[in-house]
Amino acid sequence: MTPFSKIPMFSKEDFDDWKIRMQAHLSALDDDMWFFITDGPLDITKVNTAIALSGGGPQYIEKLRIEWTAEDKKKANLYNVAKDILYKTLDKNTFSKIKTCKIGKEIWEKFIQLCEGNEQTKENKLYVATKKFDNIKMRSGESMSKFDERVSSIVIELNGLGKTYPNREVILKVIRGLPKEWDVKTMAMRESKDLNKLELHDLFADLKAYEFELQTREEVSLPHN
């Protein structure tokens, strides 16, 4: 089993990333672990031999605990392991808010409530994120790398809130957000590239290369003592 030091530690600020990492971590330990957290403990069942269904299929009933096999016990204990791993990711403050939850599903729903809020909170977050997207502009003195980080952060935030934009719309939003001195470059890009297929990281790679070229020209043109 993966050492507990490798468990992705909980972060309210990076909750979306933590969810993905935690799902991957639990699923890597056992396929059923994520199911236990999102759906609850596994029912240990057996065929009910006392009833024969007219359709020919068997009917299953829950096993008594004394009937559990070693394999049944191992499977059922995965739920306890999954819940234990969740607890180990939490700081004292967060643990105090979920410690009264009885089952993994209840714990997970509490996480969603604490970190994502109710529907009104989600709508408010989406409104703010959408406004940030609408107002994307490269700031004075901002490097292309910083602009890339800011745009990517907004797009990721929107995706986490269930809002996605067509690729072309995102590309055009970035291009239109560049200063006027970039007009020659962006006009050339519009003419030479298919904006429907251009990926955001490829766009910024091209812009960063052009930025480097501009900086190199400026350094060459500076007077030498």
Image: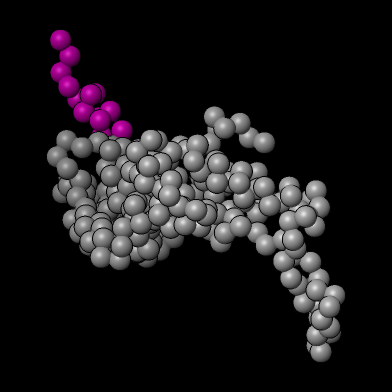
User: Is residue 98 in the magenta section?
Assistant: no
Apparent side of residue 195 relative to residue 174 in the rendered image (left or right): right
Q: Is residue 170 visible?
A: no
Instruction: Identify the residue at horizontal 67%, vertical 62% (top origin).
Output: 43
| Image position, residue 54 (x, y; %) | 81, 89
Q: Is residue 52 visible?
A: yes
The relative height of residue 48 versus residue 169 in the rendered view (above or below) is below
Instruction: Identify the residue at horizontal 85%, vertical 75% (top origin).
Output: 49
Task: Look at the image and tell me in which quarter the C terminus lies.
Answer: top left
Residue bounds of the magenta highlight: 212-225
- Residue nearest the viewer, comparing 151 with 13: 13
Instruction: Identify the residue at horizontal 43%, vertical 58% (top origin).
Output: 109
Task: Look at the image and tell me in which quarter the N terminus lies.
Answer: top right
Characterize the magenta stretch by its predominant secondary structure: helix
| Image position, residue 135 (x, y; %) | 18, 56
- Residue nearest the viewer, comparing 175 with 23: 23
- Residue nearest the viewer, comparing 22 with 60: 60
Instruction: Identify the residue at horizontal 28%, vertical 38% (top origin).
Output: 146
| Image position, residue 198 (x, y; %) | 41, 56
| Image position, residue 222 (x, y; %) | 17, 22
Q: Quadrant of residue 130?
A: bottom left
Apparent side of residue 4 relative to residue 62 in the rendered image (left or right): left
User: Is residue 213 in the magenta section?
Assistant: yes
Furthest-bottom residue in this view: 54
Apparent side of residue 44 relative to residue 11 in the rendered image (left or right): right
The relative height of residue 24 versus residue 176 in the rendered view (above or below) is above
The relative height of residue 89 versus residue 69 in the rendered view (above or below) is above
